[in-house]
């Protein structure tokens, strides 16, 4: 069944599910700055809004808009900034 997750005092929420592509979550982030860690390779797609991302071992932030995807390797940390409520889909490989 579905599993709900809540992080950063409720500012990030997601629902986990099984998709044809593998384990996945859909979620929302409130305006703010966050740091996440990965335990698998993550393919994250912005579904509404924008995310500005600092990927591991990068020095420049990059902004991803609706329907754009970025990939984070396993066992890495990455930083996220959102200026407005933003939704996403994440596939775990």
Image (cartoon, rainbow, N blue to C red):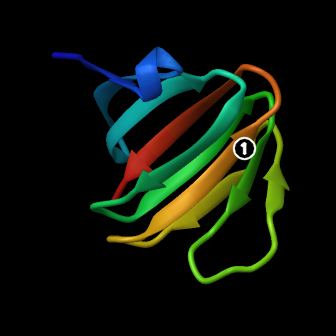
Residue situated in front as seen by the camera: 21 or 58: 58
Residue 24 shown left or right of residue 70 in the figure: left
Determine crowd level at label 1: few under 14, some 14-19, many 20+ residues with C-alpha closer than 10 A: some
Work out whether residue 22 or residue 84 is closer to the camera in this orientation and state it: 84
Seen at 70% across and 56% down, the residue is 53
Q: Is residue 39 above or below residue 20?
A: below
Count the numbered circles shown. 1
Residue 17 location, quadrant: top left
Q: Quadrant of the N terminus?
A: top left
Image quadrant in which the C terminus is located: bottom left
Instruction: Please determine whether, in this image, residue 77 is positioned above or below residue 5.
Output: below
Kindly identify which residue carries mark 1: 81
Q: Residue 55: where, in percent of width, then height?
A: 62, 69
Q: Residue at x 35, y 71 (%)?
A: 74
Whole-percent x and y of residue 42?
Answer: 44, 57
Q: Residue 75 occupies which quadrant of the picture? A: bottom left
Q: Is residue 82 left or right of residue 18?
A: right
Residue that protrudes farthest toward the left in the picture: 1
Image spot of residue 35 (x, y percent): 52, 51
Q: Residue at x 83, y 53 (%)?
A: 63
Can you name the residue that lies furthest to the bottom here?
57
Give the secondary structure at mark 1: strand
| Residue at 23% over, 17% down | 2
When the figure is inspected, residue 49 is found, relative to residue 53, above or below; the finding is above
Q: Where residue 41 appears, x then y in whole percent? A: 38, 65
Depth check: give the residue in front, 34 or 71.
34
Query: Does residue 44 appear left or right of residue 23 in this picture?
Result: right
């Amino acid at each position: 069944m579905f599993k709900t997750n809540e992080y950063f005092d409720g500012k990030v929420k997601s629902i986990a599910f099984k998709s044809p592509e593998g384990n996945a979550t859909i979620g929302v982030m409130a305006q703010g700055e966050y740091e996440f860690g990965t335990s698998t390779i993550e393919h994250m797609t912005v579904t509404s809004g924008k995310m500005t991302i600092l990927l591991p071992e990068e020095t420049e932030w990059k902004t991803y808009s609706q329907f754009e995807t970025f990939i984070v390797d396993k066992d890495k940390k990455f930083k996220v900034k959102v200026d407005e409520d933003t939704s996403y889909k994440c596939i775990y490989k």
